[in-house]
Image: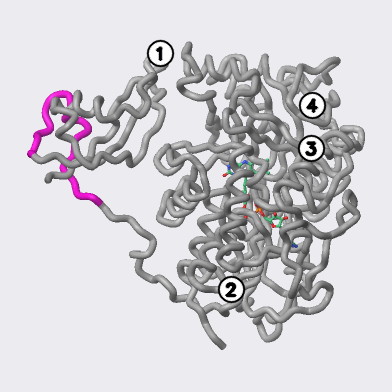
Amino acid sequence: MFTYRYRELAVALEKKGEIRSALAKTLRVNPEEIFNLEVERFSLDSRRKGDLRWSYNVVFDLKRKIRATGNNARGLIESQREIRSLDAEPGKSTVPMASHVDIIGAGPSGLWAALHLLRKGFSVDIYEQGKQVEERFRDIRKFFVDRKFNAHSNVLFGEGGAGAFSDGKLNTRSRNLFSETVLKDMVQFGVDESVVTFAKPHIGTDKLVLMLREIRAEIIKLGGKIHFNTVLEDIEIKQGRICAIKLKETKDERRGSASSPTETKDDVAIGNWKPCEALVLAVGHSARDIYQLLHARGVQLESKAFAMGVRVEHPQILINKRQLGNVDTKLTGAAEYFLATPTLNKTSSAYSFCMCPGGVLVPCASEPGTLATNGMSYSRRNGAYANGAIAVPITAGAEGFDIPSSGSLFGGLDLQRKIESDAYNVGGKNYAAPAQTIKNFLAHREDKALPKSTYPCGLVPSNLWDWMDKTICNSLAEGFQNFDRKIPGFIEEGLIVAPETRTSSPLRIPRNNETLESVNTKGLFVLGEGAGYAGGIVTSAADGVRLAHFAKKENR
Ligand SMILES: Cc1cc2nc3c(=O)[nH]c(=O)nc-3n(C[C@H](O)[C@H](O)[C@H](O)COP(=O)(O)OP(=O)(O)OC[C@H]3O[C@@H](n4cnc5c(N)ncnc54)[C@H](O)[C@@H]3O)c2cc1C
């Protein structure tokens, strides 16, 4: 047998998945001559509007040698099959870790750390301040109606973390064995197997919720314990080593009880100090109380650059037309955009982030009396609107911004809080969001009436220039002008819903690159977005896989 790869095999839109016949035709061989055909990666090739295709990278075997000639010469390479597996990676099991691990946070990084540590024979307890995903879903729905904010069960907090009520995009900039392992795990938990090979995989909130139930069942089957409604309140560090944690039950105002049906309560030392030799912090970028606690206990933190801005919403039909031309989007999926302002001064350029085709806007504050927006979508992405964050880079510690703590460790966090609380007040203190058409934003004029929006808690017309930071507003204005040249109608048909403050963490917990341990606290392993080293569902989960991959059980 001879092994070949073919790069960028073109397949007609309506023939998605019909690769054998397309490959045979391109190579001028019989379809039956092709053996062991596997897709390595595929994407929608939209470079030529009006002539969209699927583009596949495949590997396959033939019994005879063929030559790259004419039509097939561009893509054909004689090759070898690679067996890519995490277990074959060097450096496995080199980081000593106590055989019992306490994990704080049941977002992607905490769940994947638990799963892979359990698979390696560690015992694991997970503590999550929020509820299991089904109950959390009900709380969020109820909040949209009664506006009673639950600080522990919301769009950011609860089983699945910030990833559960998200757009469910699973793309990562760095595909590696850890992220591939995450995607393969997801398939094991019921997600469509195309997520492993599609260049821009997406699953949507409805499927994410189902997957989370399967992960929970697997963790429990492997002997892991999940304690919902349980918040990490304090940590004890002695001689530079973590030695105890203090946990507290979170009160559920709605049910009058702190318990959740599937949580484990047997050996949780609620309110008392519990000895702990290995603590994994997987708390996400919105656990502001944890940053303050770590700082107070002497764990090293540093401010980092991040981004803030607004959400914009457009009719999906406009984005489809401008990005894909006249095409049946049932074949392609709803269109996306990736936009950035080319400017020499990189610190003031606006760019699009976390775009949700066919999605909806959601309020995603994590503290009462504050307002932040974000976007999510369902697996079909068939809503009438497209939304995306338009973000502006913010310097580490919000250096140069107009706040008293500018340039200090918590400057970035304070700037987030200020903008979120101003937005809450401007919106009328009931989670309605300040909004402005892009057209009137550029004219510095408040709208008399606003167009329709998917934001569930109502909109209030507001001139953003009156209360949002001017540096941010100026960069946004420059960005909108630029984006309108790429997508005509971006200004005319665009609605701003403000603010988008939670794009990433304003702080980092410096860690050893190999052990993922805090640089000054032994036994404290820091993962995911909260640690400041990941930016998304897959990279956060991959951080958890990586921790477990290098962990070596230490019996002390
Ligand atoms: C609306 C929205 C849409 C998004 N869309 C996408 C997308 O399409 N694709 C993508 O890749 N990323 C998306 N993201 C980002 C993604 O969700 C995060 O990058 C990811 O969830 C980070 O994972 P994590 O495990 O580090 O933290 P998180 O997911 O934030 O999880 C942290 C968990 O820790 C818990 N916790 C915090 N403090 C404590 C404590 N003291 N005690 C106990 N528990 C605690 C929290 O309750 C939370 O459940 C989106 C985020 C939001 C909010």
Point out the tag, 3 or 1, that comes first from the N-terminus: 1
SS label for mark 3: helix
Magenta residues (range): 64-81
Q: Image quadrant of residue 423?
A: top right
Looking at the image, do the residues carrying marks 3 and 4 touch, with CB atoms under 8 Å apart?
Answer: no
Q: Where is residue 385 in the image (x, y as percent from the top left)?
A: 65, 22
The residues bearing labels 3 and 1 have C-alpha atoms spaced at a distance of 41 Å
Q: Image quadrant of residue 440?
A: top right
Reading the image, the residue beneath label 1 is 50
What residue is drawn where x is 43% and y is 51%?
A: 180
Q: In the image, is the residue at mark 1 within 8 Å of ligand 1 by its beta carbon?
A: no
SS label for mark 1: loop
The residues bearing labels 3 and 2 have C-alpha atoms spaced at a distance of 35 Å
Looking at the image, do the residues carrying marks 3 and 2 touch, with CB atoms under 8 Å apart?
Answer: no
- The kind of residue tagged 4 is Ala
Point out the tag, 3 or 4, that comes first from the N-terminus: 3
Point out the tag, 3 or 2, that comes first from the N-terminus: 2
The residues bearing labels 1 and 2 have C-alpha atoms spaced at a distance of 55 Å
- The kind of residue tagged 2 is Ser
Q: Which of marks 3 and 1 is in front?
A: 3
SS label for mark 2: strand
Rendered image: mark on residue 141: 3
Reading the image, the residue beneath label 4 is 435
Q: Position of residue 411 (x, y in %)?
A: 75, 54
Decide whether residue 75 is among the magenta residues. yes
Please state, as top left, top right, bottom left or bottom right, where the C terminus lies in the image: bottom right
The residues bearing labels 3 and 4 have C-alpha atoms spaced at a distance of 22 Å
Front residue of 166 and 402? 166
What residue is drawn where x is 61% and y is 34%?
A: 350
Front residue of 283 and 221? 221
